[in-house]
């Protein structure tokens, strides 16, 4: 017999984005963002040190990224690694592999790729300095 438990109330509010790529904007390059990045326009490149990523309904991202949490409403072409929650809402299109500790996918999401579930333990230690320094060292 299967029992369903109700979701606990979320006590913490999600802070508003502190960096926004607006509708009609097109950005290419490397972004270093602390906090939350919201993409409403187009972005292609690398995103470093971002804790939370939000792709708006009209947003298009062409990049491989690693963040703590992600909310996807628009289109992503690339791999997404979320060390916390990866949420894809109806209408989202993701073309690439995803890896996350927790994945929420609504009906109506188009997903083409592989999904890997991460453990909550040792994977979260890679989020900060080790992984970022490894990327910078490989580029430099």
Image (cartoon, grey):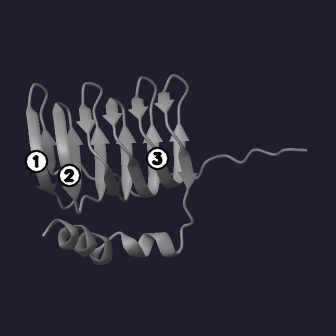
The answer to whether 114 is drawn above or below residue 119 in the figure is: above
The label number, if any, that marks residue 135 in the structure image:
none
Name the residue tied to disc 3.
Answer: 98
Residue depicted at x 42% and y 55%: 82
- Check disc 2 and report the residue beneath it: 46
- 140 to 88, vertically: above or below: below
Residue in view at x 35 percent, y 69 percent:
127
Q: Residue furthest right?
A: 1
79 horizontally vs 5: left or right: left
Q: Position of residue 113 (x, y in %)?
A: 50, 37
Q: How many marks?
A: 3
Side (left or right) of 39 relative to 101: left
What is the spatial separation of the Cα atoms under label 1 and label 2, in whole angstroms?
A: 6 Å
The part of the image, by quadrant, that contains residue 118 is bottom right
Query: For the residues marked 1 and 3, what is the alpha-carbon distance in whole angstroms?
Result: 22 Å
Above or below residue 79? Residue 83 is below
Q: Secondary structure at mark 1?
A: strand
Identify the residue under disc 1. Answer: 29
Local packing at callout 2 (Cα closer than 10 Å; few below 14, some 14-19, many 20+) is some
Q: Nearer the viewer, residue 55 or 98?
A: 98
Q: Residue at image x 32%, y 29%?
A: 74
Q: Residue at x 37, y 42 (%)?
A: 71
């Amino acid at each position: 017999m299967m029992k369903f438990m109700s979701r606990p109330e979320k006590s913490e509010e999600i802070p508003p984005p502190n960096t926004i790529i607006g509708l009609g904007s097109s950005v290419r390059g490397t972004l270093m963002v602390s906090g939350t990045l919201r993409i409403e326009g187009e972005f292609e490149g690398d995103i470093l040190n971002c804790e939370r990523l939000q792709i708006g309904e009209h947003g298009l991202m062409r990049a491989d990224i690693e963040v703590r949490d992600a909310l996807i409403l628009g289109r992503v072409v690339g791999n997404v690694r979320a060390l916390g929650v990866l949420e894809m809402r109806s209408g989202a299109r993701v073309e690439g592999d995803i890896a996350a500790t927790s994945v929420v996918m609504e009906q109506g999401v188009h997903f083409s790729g592989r999904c890997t579930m991460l453990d909550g333990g040792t994977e979260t230690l890679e989020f900060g300095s080790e992984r970022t320094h490894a990327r910078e060292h490989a580029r430099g």
